[in-house]
Amino acid sequence: PMFYSDNYFALLPGEKKEVSFHWKDEDTRGNAPKVVVSGYNVE
């Protein structure tokens, strides 16, 4: 499993948010971790 500091939030134009991701190396089974981010009204 992967743990992160926040899983849902809204940002207004110009705002920033830092989200931390944590996992155990053995949970990746030798694969590189991949994070995909998406949103609405994103240019």
Image (cartoon, rainbow, N blue to C red):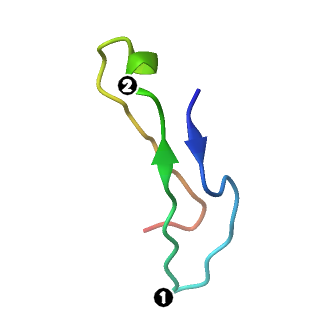
The mark tally for this picture is: 2
Which element is circle 2 on? helix
Q: Are marks 1 and 2 in contact (CB under 8 Å)?
A: no
CA neighbours of label 2 inside 10 A, class few (<14), some (14 to 19), many (20+):
few
Name which residue lies at 61% across and 56% down: 5
Q: Is residue 20 above or below residue 36?
A: below
Name the image quarter holding residue 25. top left
Q: Which numbered disc, 1 or 2, marks the residue that appears first in the sequence?
A: 1
Which element is circle 1 on? loop
The kind of residue on which mark 2 rests is Asp
Marking on residue 43: none
CA neighbours of label 1 inside 10 A, class few (<14), some (14 to 19), many (20+):
few
- Viewer-side residue, 12 vs 2: 2
- Spatial CA distance of label 1 from label 2 is 34 Å
- Percent coordinates x, y for residue 34 in the rendering: 38, 33
- Viewer-side residue, 25 vs 35: 25
- Percent coordinates x, y for residue 33 in the rendering: 36, 30
- Percent coordinates x, y for residue 35 in the rendering: 43, 40
Q: Is residue 36 above or below residue 43?
A: above
Q: Is residue 21 above or below residue 8?
A: above
The kind of residue on which mark 1 rests is Gly
Name which residue lies at 52% across and 60% down: 19
In the picture, which quadrant includes the N terminus?
A: top right
Which mark's residue is nearer the viewer, 1 or 2?
2
The residue wearing badge 2 is 25
